[in-house]
Image (tube, rainbow, N blue to C red):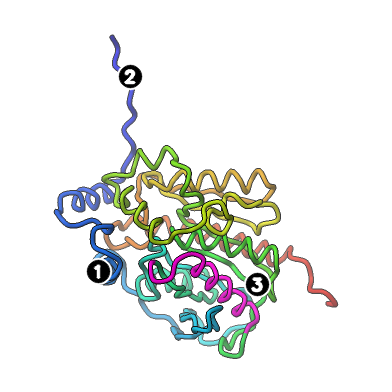
Amino acid sequence: MTEPFVRTPYIRPDVKVFVDYLNAVSSPGTHELGAIEARRMMAAMRPLIDLPTGKLALIRNLAAPGPDGRPIPLRLYDSRAARAPGPVLVFFHGGGWVLGDLDTHEPLCAEIARMLDIPVIAVDYRLAPEHRWPAAPDDCEAAARWIAAAPAELERAVTGLVLAGDSAGGTLTIVTALALRDVPAAVPVLAQWPIYPAVDAARKFASFDLFGQGYVLSRETMDWYHENYAADLDHWRGAPIRGDQGGMPPTLVLTASLDPLRDHGRTYAAATIAAGVPTIFREAAGTVHGFLNLRRAIPSSQQDLAGALATLKAMIAEAETTRPAPAGA
């Protein structure tokens, strides 16, 4: 009897070295450490797995008023000390809504600012389990609206927003874009860039079983994140694929082919296309979840980032030339 054909998933050489090393190391999983220790470990790992921040003309801490009365910490990155009016990219970090902060994603935000040549503002939203859903989407929406209003603290005139984020931040990107579609901010959202987002934790996609063990992000850790975040998965702010995607801004979805969240991104791109949203879908072949923060450990990730940003740059330029003129202009 002929054995059924089983296709071995392609894995890049530098990804295989990294994954083999992680799988050979005997250490507790993120879900076994607890939130506080897992945050410490994520911060300690940054210089070992990611590239340095590098030089920029401007890196400055800011704060937006939060919905709970607490200031929301922000960090502005810009390759120019001063610039003419233009778009700003608002970045929401990943970490399962439990981990991550302004420091963990600083190298990525700085590189985006350099390569896109637009200001990037990272948002340090509240984390679970200390602050469960909807604290994170509340903070992200409030920060985006504050930035859109171009307060004096920015020292920059803002003509439009680009919303972006990785993993949990990719989810928050979509949720924030939906909120600003329904109740517009002071300037339009020109584009959104969800990076390997989770769009519906209630659905167990095929990639969850295919890559949920041995490929950096485990199913146990994902379950732990969702338990801590405690989102209402019947609500579009908890599972954004459940919202109507019609009228969303031009969308760039980036996934990794060996990611348990791969099919979340694929499904979201299909939903925006079905809703008539201009959408570009890119999948980084042979790599794993979180690759944009692994540019030292996985050097080929730099080319993935460059390719995605070249696409996003063209999308932003097109959106700027086609957006409607402000009322009364």
Q: Which mark is residue 74?
A: none
Indicate which disc residue 160 carries: 3
Q: Secondary structure at mark 1?
A: helix
Which secondary structure type mostly characterizes the magenta part of the structure? helix
Q: Nearer the viewer, residue 268 or 136?
A: 136
Identify the residue at horizontal 29%, vertical 47% (top origin): 215
Query: Is 231 placed left or right of 84 in the picture?
Result: left
- How many angstroms separate mark 2 from mark 1 (CA)? 44 Å
Front-lying residue, 304 or 182: 182
Judge whether residue 140 is colored magenta. Answer: yes
Q: Is residue 276 above or below residue 179?
A: above
Res. 37 mark: 1
Please name the residue that numbered disc 2 is placed on: 4
Alpha carbon distance from label 3 to label 1: 38 Å
Whether residue 47 is visible to the viewer of this picture, yes or no, is: no
| Residue at x 45% of width, y 40% of height | 205
Would you say the residues marked 2 and 1 are in contact, meaning their CB atoms lie under 8 Å apart? Answer: no
Looking at the rendered image, the disc whose residue lies closer to the viewer, 3 or 1, is: 1
What amino acid type should be assigned to the residue bearing mark 2?
Pro
Q: Residues within 10 Å of mark 2 (few under 14, many from 20)?
A: few
Q: Where 74 sits versus 189, above or below?
A: below
The x, y position of residue 135, in whole percent, is 50, 70
Q: Position of residue 79 (x, y in %)?
A: 48, 79
Residue 57 image offset from top left, x and y in percent: 45, 84
Residue 128 shows in this picture? yes
Res. 305 image quadrant: bottom left
Decide which of 230, 178 is in the foreground and name it. 230
Q: Which residues are magenta?
A: 129-150
Q: Is residue 2 above or below residue 287?
A: above
Work out whether mark 3 precedes mark 1 in sequence or the reverse, and give the earlier one: 1
Of badges 2 and 1, nearer the viewer stands: 1
